[in-house]
Amino acid sequence: MKKEILELSQAMKNHSIDAYIVTSSDSHASEYVHPHFRYRAYASGFTGSAGTLLVMRDADMTEAFLWTDSRYFLQAESELENSEIKLMKIGEPGVPSLEDFLSETLKNGAVCGADADTVSCGEGKGLIAAITRAGASFKNIDLADEIWKDRPPLSSSDNIFILDERVTGESATDKLTRVRAFIQNISADIHVISGLDDIAWLLNLRGNDVKDSPVFYSRLVISKDECRLYAFKEAFDENVKKYVSELGVRLLPYNDFYDDFEKLFSGKTVLFDPGKSTYAVYDRLKKISRVLTGENPSDRMKAIKNETEIAALKNANILDGVAMVRFIFRVKKAARESEAMSELGAAELLWKKRREAGAFSESFETIAGYKEHGAIVHYSADKTSDKQLENEGFLLVDSGGHYNLPGGNGLISAPAAGTTDITRTIALGPISDEMRDNYTRVLMGVIDLASAVFPENATGAQLDTLAHKYLWEKGLDFKHGTGHGIGFILNVHEGPQSISYRGMVPFCEGMVTSDEPGVYLDGEYGIRIENDILCKKAERDGMLCFETLTLCPFEKDAIKKELLNKKQLRFINDYHKKVFSLISPYLSDEENAWLKSVTSPI
Amino acid sequence: MKKEILELSQAMKNHSIDAYIVTSSDSHASEYVHPHFRYRAYASGFTGSAGTLLVMRDADMTEAFLWTDSRYFLQAESELENSEIKLMKIGEPGVPSLEDFLSETLKNGAVCGADADTVSCGEGKGLIAAITRAGASFKNIDLADEIWKDRPPLSSSDNIFILDERVTGESATDKLTRVRAFIQNISADIHVISGLDDIAWLLNLRGNDVKDSPVFYSRLVISKDECRLYAFKEAFDENVKKYVSELGVRLLPYNDFYDDFEKLFSGKTVLFDPGKSTYAVYDRLKKISRVLTGENPSDRMKAIKNETEIAALKNANILDGVAMVRFIFRVKKAARESEAMSELGAAELLWKKRREAGAFSESFETIAGYKEHGAIVHYSADKTSDKQLENEGFLLVDSGGHYNLPGGNGLISAPAAGTTDITRTIALGPISDEMRDNYTRVLMGVIDLASAVFPENATGAQLDTLAHKYLWEKGLDFKHGTGHGIGFILNVHEGPQSISYRGMVPFCEGMVTSDEPGVYLDGEYGIRIENDILCKKAERDGMLCFETLTLCPFEKDAIKKELLNKKQLRFINDYHKKVFSLISPYLSDEENAWLKSVTSPI
């Protein structure tokens, strides 16, 4: 057994713990986390973003299990090889859920531990019910702290920055007023916010604690008269401290939150969002206060982008389009001229173009998957897998950037800001008729969703089928969601709306969502096309529609015109015309000639 | 205040009850009920199928409220006029739900009563939570029995009949075995079935206790060793009694169920379907047994029609198509030749044609709405509203039949059986271009849904948008579900699957569902087109599709060809060809000439 597991097993023995659960989460239910919270990766060796480790000991026998979902089966198999950790493939026949496994395996009277501050509230309720069913008990304990010698301390670097109102369009004061009105309206006394993106949005502040996600570790507690920000003070320079103080927000040490807990919440009616908090917070709250579990108002408020944000985001999409067009032109040229370039090299080139265009960061690690690597939905090239690009087949590139240019830049003179997320599948040379057929069906899904008209209360679940329909007709499908919300200089995956069969949040004017169907042929190639779409009022009363924000041509050579209906054909030609007119002013002559040819009508 | 409400208020006073709830349900969560359960209509005067009456008294002041949904707003307004009962329009702004109203209005210490055997389990839980929140208490009491002098006694007439295996395809013995295997598999001791359609399906018996729904009042209790049928014995003739006895089923008086309750369930693990039982049963069960709330296995089993049922249903649809074609031919002729015919007359004519074709009953009361009456989704003509048909505009006819011909009839020599549900919107003369445009959009929705290909786990929610899309594009919509399951010689509305944004049950091969989008222009006209569609395996592995069972031409003169895509045009021409070839053998020369012209290619 892996030595890190044996260390953990020894610590369990010292604390009389029979089973121990290690999640991949932080204390804020974040999707991407600070390295401090990567104990699951340290102990198991599995580095994927989602997975739960369970270690069980009985006498001196230690067993370990890792649950992960289909996105990570291949990666987990390879990373767990020779570790003696058993891979539990979620959703596969005969594989019990962690809850079922615990309730069947734990002995009566056993003790099962976990750090309840890294277990989401909903997950925690389920686990504790399962542990109780087995006649076992739960112990909240963080064993990582005592075992993991080089654990990176949780802290912020000194780079928290204030967003300009020329890009946010609404002051933090006004946002706090809106949230306070919501709290008062539901008769709560106090509201605790754990979501890092909610806090960043509310205060118009951004940080750099998580790679590619401009958030900072903190908790916000807001009542009628008071607002407390528990955060790492060292990350706030004098200017930001002054700003925070002028907002009427008291800056307190991050770790004081639990010390102040009793004083803050005892006897109060507390608005609490179980979706973005940990079980530890919930468990303590429910003992001393009346908990109103419900919608965290910032969640929906920040999903609805205001006019200033939308205008800045449209400009950011021009800059992003310039970067993408330059990149595609260059990568195609390299393939055509047999210039050496690999997947990692392409990702590096793209970040260079994006930085030149004005991005201050990528919005997530670029996925550049060539040929069969494109079929791995969450592919991440490393030195071993890195594939050389050739003059044939598909290269799938999924990437994005964060922009924060309140005064514009050399390319654009107006405010340009926000977060982008775009996927293009690029033909590097000849492709088969079958590949063109599949590419076209994915594109028809992108278009039918982007051109839908729907009533104001419609949900993502109602729209989802539009993106699947043409693939289903051919017996094909994709298993990931069709669309996720996108933050504004914030998390590239943002709630509450989504487009998937599970998306139950009604769409509203101002929401920005991705539109990204795909098709993945194992061992052959992957196709995904992703545009960001803005929800807005349609011409007809009571109806909504989308406007496509992303500006980058589709792969014209991969489109089978005979599959398209008239509306789809018109969409493509209109879109390409718009891309050309908005992007071409920023290109070299050579790039421009290429863009003209790839955006000419079909 | 209406005298029936004052009578109820007096009875409430006698029993020290401050508030009393009257539902529209029976003790089996049926949609259509025996007249014994129509106390809500008796007391309030409102005769719609869904609505809840609340009477509150305080000192000598009596107030009454009636909650109903949008289908019934107009009808309730008219029927409650001068009654002093306040109409509570569900879903309208500012109208609280019954639960919210109770929790806000009931005084601390008040007593709120209802007959818990006419409150569904889920509804009951919500009401009791609301009553408790107000600090009030609940009392289970049936006041109708003591007030309603002419209350029709609950009973069955002597006409329960056995279905032939030539139409059911599976013996009751085999069905009981399947249900017992399910019970054993989930480690339950005993299963109580309250759904009248589930019991009828399981025993291959049908009755006549509810108009147009061939069920009989009963409860079935099944364990490994025993099966008890609590029913009205007088409805079973010697032959049926013998059949029941040979199945190993003990026939007991309907009213003995509660007497035997303790003996049957005490200390047992009971499989219980909250969706088809009342709160009274749940409340008693949970006190003496371990309740496994979950899927009632008969519900899904009966939704999946077997090969014998499907073959018989296809033949029943030929007979139903013959009736519909004869009817449409005749009603068009009457309009053209200015022959006197009203909505009620048309409905009567249709039943005559259906009876001639072999139906033994309608499957629900025919909706025949001419011009603006077609815009009332649940329109039911009466002598006052009955409109004369003229040589113009749309007549919307929604109807269906029950067929049970194990040996066929004069028209068809093979087994023909099952239940149909069809809507056609008939142009009785000239219609406007706008009407044609709307008709075509509804039809395009019918076609896109009927020709969808989708993965095996897809739900009705995923398919629903296909039927709405073309209407949404024009700012139009319909608020009812797109499709419901259809019973086999059983309830015309059957679960568990449905096609609507709420339809969360996965589709399976063998399910029969309606496909019925519409559009309703208040005060002008309504359009609905409804076909019954059978879910079956598609050509591609793992994919499903539909086959249209209904056989009756669309309104060719109302179709705007230029709106259709190629696939839709092909669907219409192929469908019309099939209708002609299957229906024409049973028509007169005159009818046949007409059918030929209305099914010729467009």
Image: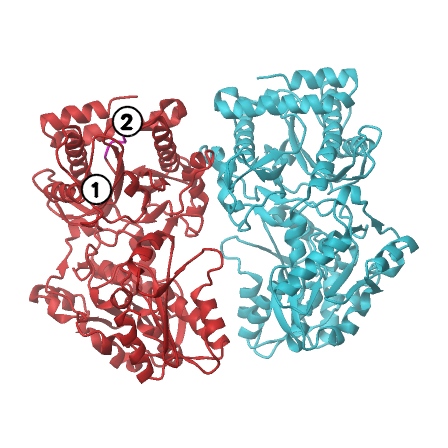
Chain colours: A cyan, B red
Q: Earlier in the sequence, mark 2 or mark 1?
A: 1
Q: Chain of mark 2?
A: B
The quadrant of the picture occupied by the N terminus of chain A is bottom right
Front position among marks 2 and 1: 1
Secondary structure of residue under mark 2? helix
Magenta part, dominant SS:
loop
Say which amino acid is labelled 1. Lys
Q: Which mark is residue B387?
A: 1
Secondary structure of residue under mark 1? loop
Q: Chain of mark 1?
A: B
In the image, is A390 to the left or to the right of B460? right
Q: Residue at x 21, y 64 (%)?
A: B34
Quadrant hosting residue B55: bottom left
Tell me if residue B385 comes above or below residue B563 in the rendering.
Answer: below
Q: Are marks 2 and 1 in contact (CB under 8 Å)?
A: no
Which range of residues does the magenta coloring cover? B552-556
Quadrant hosting residue A297: bottom right
Determine if the magenta segment contains residue A42: no
Q: Which mark is residue B556?
A: 2
Q: Position of residue B401 (x, y in %)?
A: 19, 47
Quadrant hosting residue B412: top left
The residue closer to the viewer here, B113 or A87, is: B113
Q: Residue at x 42, y 45 (%)?
A: B456
Q: Position of residue B435 (x, y in %)?
A: 34, 31
The residue closer to the viewer here, B36 or A160, is: B36
The residue closer to the viewer here, A93 or B577, is: B577
> For the residues marked 2 and 1, what is the alpha-carbon distance in whole angstroms?
25 Å
Tell me if residue B408 comes above or below residue A589 in the rendering.
Answer: below
In the image, is B36 to the left or to the right of A579? left
Binning the other alpha carbons within 10 Å of mark 2 as few (below 14), some (14 to 19) or many (20 upward) gives: many
Q: Which mark is residue A526?
A: none
